[in-house]
Amino acid sequence: MTRIAVIGCGYVGAVSAACFAELGHEVDCVDTDPDRIALLRSGRSPIHEPGLEPLIQKGIQGRRLHFLDEYPDQFEAKIVFIAVNTPESSEGAADIRWVRDAVSSVAARLGPGSIIVNKSTVPIGTGELVAGMAGRAGRGPVSVVSNPEFLREGSAVRDFMQPDRVVLGSDDPQAIERVASLYAPLEPVIQRTDIRTAEMIKYASNAFLATKISFINEIASICEALGADVAEVAHGMGMDVRIGGQFLKAGLGWGGSCFPKDVKALAHMAAIHGAHPQLLRSVMEINSDQRLRAVAKLRGALGELEGQRVAILGAAFKANTDDTRQSPALELAQLLLLEGASVAIYDPVVPAARLNHLVPMATVAGSVEEAAKDATAVVVATDWPEFIHMDLARLGEGMARRVLVDGRNVLDPLAVRAAGFDYRCVGRPGAEGPALAPALEGVHA
Ligand code: UDX
Ligand code: UDX
């Protein structure tokens, strides 16, 4: 058992802290948001993350998880993880002001021989900046390790407990081994490297995954033009182990708190250091086009959008999370409102009050049927299981027109068309409407 501290109890910090406690370590969690700490102390998770709340409760009961809303005078822990947010700045760079704040607070409270571990996604070179700040705090030698997170929201606990790899970067091999020992019960594959390389592995991983999705979205557009089925194409490609089948789902494109800011920040870093990030720029452009293409599909089905009523199913940026940061669903809602449509949104877990605040011009519905009532079209914008299994006959009953745009390619085209819908999707036969799918139409004739 090792005593550690985690600064920032958000999506990454809360999951990491609870999982480290589950591995037997004693964890002090500090967050500057007192409401969040009060919630965590009462054993509740501040975020919708499957499996997290039971781990928090177990950690509290076992006295291995402690939540603090201010920094202790002196850290008892010798290893302190920084997991504060690093949002996008208006210039597209990662804004590391919270990392700086956390490091200056931490460095003043550490004993000699301590380690600051950076889990936040930070620009390449930040590790050296942190080392400099820690050195100036004058509390004796402190080592810095970069340990980027690869936790997907919705499966973050599993991703922590069953990592594909743990990346540890530092110029201090002993510090690397001390951090590696925290993960020992998981018996992970560990990559030991220098700090800049570890920081770059994080950006390159997210940029590659985003590229894979934009690639398949571009192929989807070509499939639409040429009458091929992108879902089958992705399946066929994915069976090649050199390619792999994951992150090849065409749809409304990627969103969330990481891909958009990380791809942009990497492109920004590249450009200000004289490299020309043309692939990354295309990856971002294809992604924003996916939302516009969904608007065009609705226009193709409905005609002018002014006065239409569109139900958007899902507000989170993907299923199994309540996170709406850079959500394609909400970006689509805004685009439709700009076109003069009225919009009703339903999400199984995002609180209505938050949606009212984020998209004040839209109506927030309490169920799929309520959102679809009197709608001329429904868009499946998030791949929540509830939408994959919804009762199509019931859905259609209350609608003014039965148009369904499947922005995540999660529904069975034959079943949706059989339920009397004009069904449109992304890159599959009939993606642009029934005219392109004579064979499918024939099946139902
Ligand atoms: C994390 C990362 O650290 C980010 O770099 C990565 O790219 C994505 O995941 P995330 O966990 O999503 O960020 O952030 P968020 O859910 O916003 O939580 C950050 C927490 O840090 C909040 O609870 C906030 O109150 C806390 N915080 C922020 C501090 O405790 N101190 C600060 O100075 C700033
Ligand atoms: C990502 C990284 O995957 C994870 O390692 C960590 O660095 C945090 O950022 P996350 O943002 O939680 O995780 O979600 P992820 O599952 O990667 O999905 C990102 C976006 O891509 C979502 O909007 C999702 O809907 C979209 N996506 C994903 C697709 O459009 N198609 C796919 O095939 C996969």
Image (cartoon, rainbow, N blue to C red):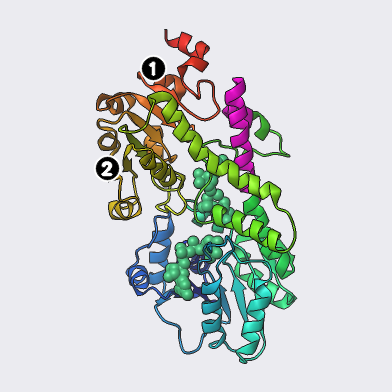
Q: Is residue 419 above or below residue 116?
A: above
Q: How crowded is mark 1: few (under 14 residues within 10 Å), some or many (20 or more)?
A: some
User: Magenta segment range?
Assistant: 208-235
Residue assigned mark 2: 365
In which quarter of the view is residue 125 placed? bottom right
Q: Is residue 230 magenta?
A: yes
Q: Is residue 258 above or below residue 168?
A: above
Number of marks in the image?
2
Which element is circle 1 on? helix
What's the magenta bit mostly, secondary-structure-wise? helix
Which element is circle 2 on? loop
Name the residue nearer the viewer: 273 or 253.
Answer: 273
Name the residue nearer the viewer: 356 or 411.
Answer: 356
Asked if residue 155 can be seen in this view, the reply is yes
Q: In this view, does 239 lie to the left or right of 16?
A: right
Q: In which quarter of the image is the C terminus?
A: top left
Residue assigned mark 1: 418
Amino acid of disc 2 = Ala
Amino acid of disc 1 = Ala
